[in-house]
Image (cartoon, rainbow, N blue to C red):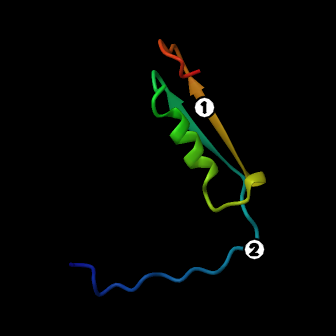
Amino acid sequence: MFLCFLRPRKYKDCKEFHHFTFIIRAHDEEDVIEDSVTSCFNVDYPKDRFNVVVFAHNCHDKTA
């Protein structure tokens, strides 16, 4: 309510998509790791312009 007087910014459409990487750290995340990775691939961005890397370290379940 305090910022209602501010107007949303309008940005120019980008001409070039940048390349970036999602990094997911996981430790005993067997129940939710699939949702996290799927969420990364469901973004509205060209699939050839990003990578998804999952670090599963010293897990005691089937996360890796």
Residue identifier under label 2: 15
Q: Dot 1 surroundings within 10 Å: few (below 14), some, or many (20 or more)? A: some
The image position of residue 42, as x and y in percent, is 61, 54
Assign the N terminus to one quadrant of the image: bottom left
Q: Earlier in the sequence, mark 1 or mark 2?
A: 2
- Whether pointer 1 and pointer 2 mark residues with C-beta atoms closer than 8 Å, the reply is no
Q: CA distance from mark 1 to mark 2?
A: 29 Å
| In the foreground, 18 or 51 | 51
Q: Position of residue 47 (x, y in %)?
A: 74, 53
Residue 5: which quarter of the image? bottom left
In the rendered image of this protein, does residue 52 appear above or below residue 54? below
Residue ID for mark 1: 54
What is the three-letter code of the residue carrying label 1? Answer: Val
- Quadrant of the rendered image containing residue 22: top right
- Residue depicted at x 73% and y 63%: 17
Q: Is residue 9 shown above or below 52? A: below
Q: Where does residue 64 sit, x and y in percent of width and height?
A: 59, 21
In the rendered structure, which amino acid carries the disc numbered 2?
Answer: Lys
Q: Which of 36/13 is in front?
A: 36
Which residue is at a point 63% across and 62% down the rendered structure image?
44
Q: Residues within 10 Å of mark 2 (few under 14, many from 20)?
A: few
Q: In terms of secondary structure, where does tag 2 sit? A: loop
At horizontal 34% and vertical 84% (from top left) the residue drawn is 6
Q: Check the image and report above or below for 12 versus 32.
A: below
